[in-house]
Image (cartoon, grey):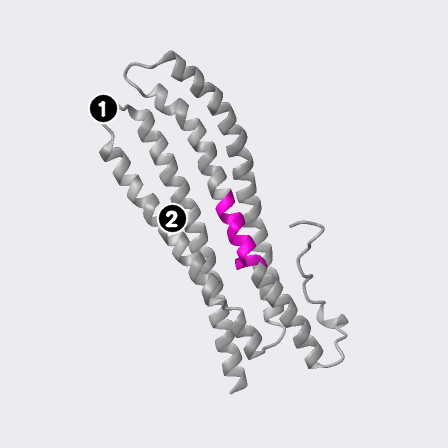
Amino acid sequence: MSPRNPLPPPPPPAEIRSWPDRDARLADRARALDELGRRLLGGVRLAMFLTWFLLLQLGWGLIGVLLTSMGQSVPDPLLLMTGLVTSVLGIGVLVPAVWLTIRSLRHDRTVRERLAQWAVLDRHGPTDARLRAPVLSACWLLLSFAMCGLGLWMGFAVPAGVSRHDGYGLVAYGMGVAMILWVTGLTGLVKAVGHYRFAVRLTGRGSSAAS
């Protein structure tokens, strides 16, 4: 998280809480939940998710030039030299992309923990219902599902469609692309489904408490 744009702080401990009344507590809770929900599923977060995915694919694609050239039955020296250069560039892209992806997952875990802390503070039907974010949740779900499906298809299609002349380098590259699709899609699915289930449980507990 950026120090210039920090997350909402967790709620204060019970012994030092000083809200004048429940309305003030609900107002602070609503602001925190709305902001944390946006940080978890908002459009900016989705754009970052796609950016890290594209960087991973770009880095692996640059490395793939070397893999495909090495896997040919008769390697081309010029193509091998080009592959060496592009693979260095690919590593320079792939390593930061992996680091950014891991950092993003840690950020999401922090947001979810803080979201749960604010959620258990009280109950408020309209605020809790907004937390479901059905449109954003559906976008994350469909996009992640498409990535998983494409990655699964490539995992079978690439080995079956590569001829002996193409060599095993193309298979390795294709399987790497499939793995990036699958893992990235799976993290998006877990995130979308987990958040929606959390929001549904929160709304259900709020309805039960109201009755």
Q: Main secondary structure of the magenta part?
A: helix
Residue 68 left/right relative to 114: left
Q: Counting residues from the N terminus, which is met first, the one under dot 2 or under dot 1?
A: 2
User: Which residue is at the far top?
Assistant: 77
Is residue 40 a member of the stretch shown in magenta? yes
Residue at the (47%, 24%) spot, across then down: 87
Residue at the (40%, 25%) spot, across then down: 65
The magenta-colored residue range is 39-51
State the image quarter where residue 96 is shown: top right
Residue 26 left/right relative to 143: right
Is residue 46 a member of the stretch shown in magenta? yes
Circle count? 2
Q: Amino acid at mark 1?
A: Arg
Query: Looking at the picture, how far across and down is residue 131, in whole percent?
Result: 53, 69
What is the distance, in whole Å, between disc 2 and disc 1 at their CAs?
28 Å
State the image quarter where residue 61 is shown: top left
Judging by the rendered image, the residue that carries numbered circle 2 is 147
For residue 138, above or below residue 14:
above
Q: Amino acid at mark 2?
A: Met
Judging by the rendered image, the residue that carries numbered circle 1 is 164
The residue closer to the viewer here, 174 or 206, is 174
Query: Looking at the picture, how far across and down is residue 119, in whole percent?
Result: 59, 70
For residue 174, above or below residue 138:
above
Say if mark 2 contacts mark 1, CB within 8 Å: no
Kind of element beneath mark 2? helix
The residue closer to the viewer here, 205 or 97, is 97
Residue 43 left/right relative to 122: left
